[in-house]
């Protein structure tokens, strides 16, 4: 039978991640302190360091949790999209739908990205998590290629996801700065359908 600390570890970890998300959003990655995160979670710093070696590792765990939640949402959207006359177009509409935590996560992830750019040792770790997140999404999206009749090699799906991410995050940055000039998701709604059409990914197979 697992000992008490082992059984409590998932709860401890969840509370630490929740607290880190709040403090990172309020203070920024650079301004957030380990002591403040632990105080917010109701633990000593020893509890954090028994789970994570650094603040960077704590962020990477947050990134993985966020990526899993995103994959779950995309999987649910893909299941619905599979019954649409234009499955990938229907799924593309998902990318222009605002997330409840879009602003919060954008601020946190952008600041850490800048931190990683300045510190190459962390850039590699972040790139690895990004690659895994894209790979998970590709496994969700790939079956829709069969629904549209497009062979899997029609598109570089990894490159396509990079492009969609750039469009989504770039558009979000502009809409947060100029909310009256650019609505959230507007660039995706306006240009992503054209990209999918040019790649031949918008016609359901007639076979």
Image (tube, grey):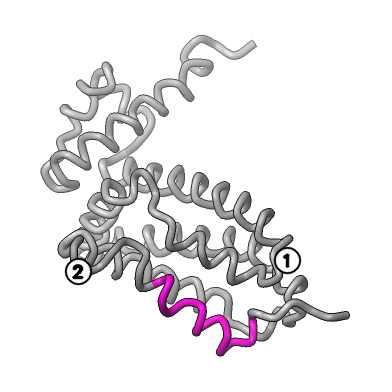
**Residue at label 2?**
181
Lower sequence index among marks 2 and 1: 1
* Position above or below: 101 against 158: above
Element assignment for label 1 = helix
Residue 143 is labelled as 1
Res 101 → quadrant? top left
State left or right for residue 90 relative to residue 61: right
Residue 168, above or below 199: above
Residue 126 lies in the magenta-colored region: no
Q: Position of residue 102 (x, y in %)?
A: 33, 50
Residue 111 locus on image (x, y percent): 21, 56
Tell me the magenta residue range. 188-201
- 49 with respect to 69 (left or right): left
The residue shown at (48%, 24%) is: 10
Q: Quadrant of the N terminus?
A: top right
Quarter holding the C terminus?
A: bottom right
């Amino acid at each position: 039978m697992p000992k008490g600390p082992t059984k409590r570890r998932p709860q401890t970890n969840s509370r630490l991640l929740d607290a880190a998300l709040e403090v990172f959003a309020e203070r920024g990655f650079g301004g957030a302190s380990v002591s403040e995160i632990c105080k917010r979670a109701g633990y000593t710093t020893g509890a954090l360091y028994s789970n994570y070696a650094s603040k960077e590792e704590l962020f990477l765990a947050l990134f993985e949790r966020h990526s899993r939640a995103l994959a779950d949402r995309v999987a649910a959207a893909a299941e619905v999209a599979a019954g649409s006359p234009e499955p990938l177009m229907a799924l593309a509409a998902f990318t222009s739908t605002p997330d409840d935590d879009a602003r919060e996560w954008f601020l946190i992830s952008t600041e850490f990205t800048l931190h990683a750019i300045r510190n190459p040792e962390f850039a590699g770790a972040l790139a690895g998590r990004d690659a895994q997140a894209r790979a998970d999404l590709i496994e969700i999206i790939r079956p829709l290629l069969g629904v549209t009749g497009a062979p899997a090699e029609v598109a570089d799906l990894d490159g396509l996801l990079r492009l969609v991410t750039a469009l989504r995050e770039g558009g979000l940055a502009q809409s947060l700065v100029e909310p009256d000039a650019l609505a959230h998701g507007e660039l995706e709604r306006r240009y992503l359908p054209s990209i999918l059409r040019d790649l031949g990914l918008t016609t359901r197979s007639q076979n």
